[in-house]
Amino acid sequence: MERTWIVGMVALAGVVIAATAFFLLRTTGTDHDLRRVIAEQDLLPIEAVDHPDALVGLGRALFFDPILSGNRDISCATCHHPSQATGDGLAVSIGTGGAGIGPNRVLGHDRELVPRNATEIFNRGASEWATMFWDGRVRLSRRGELLTPAFIGLGVDLLPPALDSVLAAQAMFPVTSETEMRGSPDQDPASNEVAGFDDREDFPAIWDALTARLMAIDGYVAGFAAAFPEVPADDIGFEHAALAIAAFEAEAYTFTESPWDRYLRGDDTAMTEDAKQGALVFFGVGGCGECHTGRLLTDQRFHVRAVPQIGPGKEPHQPRDFGRAGAGGGAETQYAFRTPPLRNVTLTGPWTHAGVYDDLEDVVRHSLDPTAALISYDPAGLSPEVAAVTLETFDGVRGAILTYLERRPIDPITLTDAQVDLIMAFLESLTDPAAADLMHTIPDSVPSGLPIDR
Ligand code: HEC
Ligand code: HEC
């Protein structure tokens, strides 16, 4: 009796020791491999940012204040809302004239949908950013000059010089877009004094009119004076508003504590074993790291990923979106879009430039064989508003993309279901738990006194 008991205990101890050793070896093996990939591919964590309080406070007010829209009915936050992980939860956005926030937002009477999915705006204060928008129409040139739609040719650049980053330059443009914030002279009352300007040559007129609105409000006069003590009130322009908005976006929506970021800073225990193995698939056989790379998990370049196109499209009179080519990228960049950065990606659906997927695993499966995914995509589940401008032309646009892909095929990648699960675990490790609740970034009120989207 006693002997059997001892033999049993010894055998059990042996099993436990062997299992622990196996587990440790497997984990240290994974860490060893992953740390090598991280070093080779120069993968880095997100860093904290720090901007002056007065600038951030002014930026917060402006970001949430509908005063920046022609009809005083929509703010930046309507489409980049704290309740929607800095996006709007819609496939493609709904601008001025619409009502509500999040997936239930509805289009105003006779208004058009915005052609693209609202990007999340996490970590956009990082100094590596050199491109903004799905088509990179705001970007830094190799010589470090800001190139934007305000460069109207013949050497004329209407962009004010004070802007110091692509993020600040970006904030100059939503207010000029007729469908997003400005409104239209045909639909809107005379009280909308910015609707009548032309959105190309008249950029400065739009910016000046909005600045005049702001400087007629005591709270903003004080806010600009505190944020820009060296600039006299008469010299405040919309670029100062844009600088403040950029400071707020960076300060409020930079998150440095995802498991992946903690792991990158040296904490081996920050990620689960599955997430680590998923990272090895992602940066290895999955091929994802060819584009989703570096500190921001984007090469900031433009690639054709055969994403189905829904919504009104960007081209005049054509329900399609040429992506980078539509913003001056040349014919070889047709249907190419900027690689998205993936931090907090589990929170930021629907995904892709047209918001066609609401299930993240579908995006991963699409990424493995983009052409097959385009062929099998079924537009049946679209919202009525999107379906109305999509269904009739969908097959024609899909055919055009497929024809384009015949000349430039995308090689499919085959992974097992288990490997796809591991990639999903890695994508989950890119989410900072603090990014899941952003409601504290909403101010109690804004200087215009207009209602805030909550
Ligand atoms: C009607 C909805 C809407 C409003 C209002 C809006 N945006 Fe956006 N935002 C979008 C959409 C859609 C995109 C992507 C457009 C594209 O790529 O062509 C975008 C893109 C961006 C980006 C680019 C991020 C990147 O990395 O490419 C930033 C930053 C941003 N918006 C900030 C703002 C700010 C600041 C305001 C207010 C001044 C604002 N947005 C107002 C819908 C909106
Ligand atoms: C050749 C470059 C490239 C490769 C390889 C690649 N991606 Fe992407 N990825 C992109 C681009 C570009 C987009 C945006 C495409 C669009 O919307 O038209 C994108 C979109 C995404 C999105 C949606 C993100 C969002 O915010 O909407 C996810 C998730 C994603 N990719 C994951 C992956 C995974 C996982 C892999 C590997 C299996 C992968 N990607 C491989 C370039 C690439």
Image (cartoon, grey):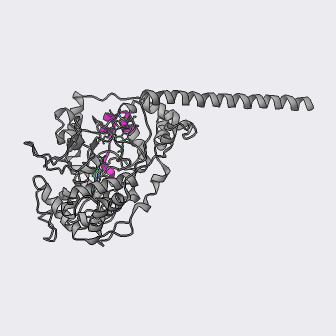
Query: In the image, what residue occupies the spot 30% across and 65% down?
Result: 223
The residue positioned farthest toward the right in the image shown: 1
Q: Compared to 234, does 3 lie above or below? A: above
Whether residue 262 sits left or right of residue 376 in the image: it is right
Residue 438, image quadrant: bottom left
Instruction: Residue at 26% x, 53% y: name it.
Output: 171
Picture coordinates of residue 211, whole percent (x, y) = 20, 63
State the image coordinates of residue 66 (x, y, percent, origin top left).
27, 65
105 relative to 13 in the view: left or right:
left
| Quarter of the figure with residue 4 | top right
Q: Which one is in front, 252 or 162?
A: 162
Q: Is the magenta stretch mostly helix, strand or loop?
A: helix
Q: Quadrant of the N terminus?
A: top right
Q: In this view, does 26 lie above or below 213?
A: above
**Residue segment shown in magenta:** 365-381
279, 151: nearer the viewer: 151
